[in-house]
Image (cartoon, helix red, strand yellow):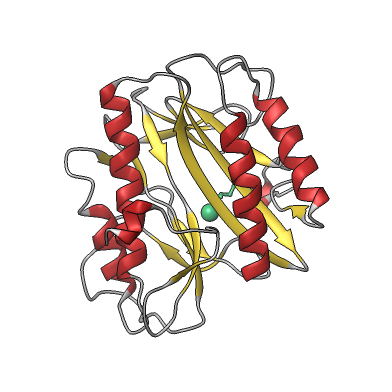
Amino acid sequence: MREAGRLNAEVRAILQDAIEPGITGRALDELARREIARRGGEPTFVGYAPGGRPPYPGAICFSVNEELVHGIPGERVLQEGDIVSIDLGLTYRGWVSDAAFTAGVGVITAEAQRLLDVTEAALWKGIAAARGGAALGDVSFAIGSTAEGYGIVDEYGGHGVGRRMHEEPHIVNKGRPGSGLRLKAGMVLALEPMFALGHQATVEGPDGWTVRMRDGSLCAHFEETIAVTDGAAEVLTRIEAPAAQRAG
Ligand code: MF3
Ligand code: CO
């Protein structure tokens, strides 16, 4: 799983660098497929079809502005001032890694930048809380209590990861400290806070996948795959921990 995570981080960095005004979701998707294949991995999301959904057509999810998650990469062009969430699943030797980030395209508003910063900070608070012996509710609480003033999406959340992308447990982005199952060393989890400037409610699009905010407000999504240990969690989808985590 470490390898799957490291390769995911490598491909993510390449996608991050490629984001600029004028690029399409399709171009980023093709780049992701190429870079995943070059590393001997497989795009986890391609063909994913839980519970009678149409098979997911992309290697990445590409969700712009009021689109929250599961946007399908196509001909839409990124514009200066957009924010875009890129979600990437990479399978390596049968093990899955799942990670996402939201980035500004060119110059974005201060309000949008704050939303990105707070959502990413919540992810790192959740990671810091995910120590062996802690309760799952401690992680949910750490994430949710960072969201002061934002809509906390609770229709989607984090999950266990392993041979399959979505395993037990489901991880909500708000919760009560001390509640829920106890974390044990060796568990691998994907934490994924999703916050919005407006109301938390979401709607699903007619394509069967794209999830957007019901009120059309701007939203952000960050995700890392982590391994629980007896101490601080190991972040599998990062090559280096960002400053937010080093700062504690
Ligand atoms: N990272 C996403 C999640 O955990 C998975 C994307 S769903 C897919 O929900 F259809 F795109 F594969
Ligand atoms: Co996920």
Q: Residue at x 37, y 64 (%)?
A: 127
Q: Residue at x 59, y 44 (%)?
A: 13
Residue 178 x, y percent position in the rendering: 22, 76
- Residue situated in front as seen by the camera: 21 or 203: 21
The image quadrant where one finds the C terminus is: bottom left
Residue 52 x, y percent position in the rendering: 68, 47
Residue 193 x, y percent position in the rendering: 38, 50
Query: Looking at the image, how many numbered discs can be counted on the residues?
Result: 0
On the question of residue 209 being in view, the answer is no
Locate residue 151: give its quadrant: top left
Residue 176 x, y percent position in the rendering: 21, 66
Residue 95, compared with residue 215, is above or below; it is below
Residue 54 located left or right of residue 69: right
Q: Residue at x 21, y 70 (%)?
A: 177
Residue 56 located left or right of residue 17: right
On the question of residue 234 being in view, the answer is yes
Residue 40, compared with residue 25, is above or below; it is below
Q: Residue furthest left?
A: 149
The image quadrant where one finds the N terminus is: bottom right
- Residue situated in front as seen by the camera: 181 or 39: 39
